[in-house]
Image (tube, helix red, strand yellow):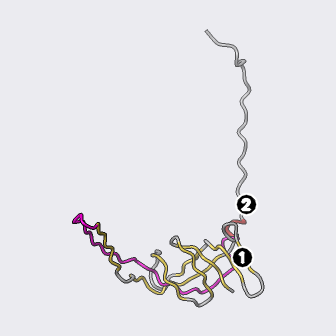
Amino acid sequence: MFAVVKTGGKQYKVAKDDVIKVEKLTGDAGASIDLTDVLMVGDEKAATVGTPLVDGAVVTATVLEQARADKIVVFKKKRRKNYRRTQGHRQDLTVLRITDIQAKGKAQKAAAKPKAAAKPKAEKPAEADAGETKE
């Protein structure tokens, strides 16, 4: 079984026991994270595509470590203008191991609880007509 998950503005195709690096998510090493933005769930036989998300689908992952990516150099230059700017960047990453993919999971159970219906307010009888004014 596989799933397409959206996190950090990117999409990842994952299967059970895959290890992926995503943009930083909160959680210490060993913590469990539920990814609820599941765009597609499928297997060898059939696939379910969400509109935009698959209802009730949950991908569970375990945080392996909080890491940082390699440094990239951002260099800007305009020729013949004596304009040069150099800047570096290291992205914070979270390394995840996918532990479970559920097509109908925990999110559906939470959504299935009916909300209490709002009671209508009792109307007060109008003693005076709206057109009358008191002087």
Q: Position of residue 101 (x, y in %)?
A: 65, 82
Element under label 1?
A: loop
On whether residue 95 falls in the magenta region, the answer is yes
Q: Residue shown at 54%/81% (left/top)?
A: 32
Q: Residue under circle 2? A: 114
Q: Which range of residues does the magenta coloring cover?
A: 79-108
Q: Amino acid at mark 2?
A: Pro
Q: Position of residue 87 (x, y in %)?
A: 29, 72
Toward the front, the furthest residue is: 80
Q: Residue shown at 77%/82% (left/top)?
A: 46
14 versus 11 height, above or below: below
Q: Magenta segment, principal secondary structure?
A: strand
For this view, does 122 lie left or right of residue 94?
right
Residue 81, quarter of the rendered image: bottom left
User: Is the residue marked by circle 1 packed among few (<14), some (14-19), or many (20+) residues within 10 Å?
Assistant: few
Q: Quadrant of the N terminus?
A: bottom right
Q: Residue under circle 1? A: 104
Which mark sits nearer the N-terminus, 1 or 2? Answer: 1
Toward the left, the furthest residue is: 82
88 versus 20 height, above or below: above
Toward the right, the furthest residue is: 45
51 versus 22 height, above or below: above
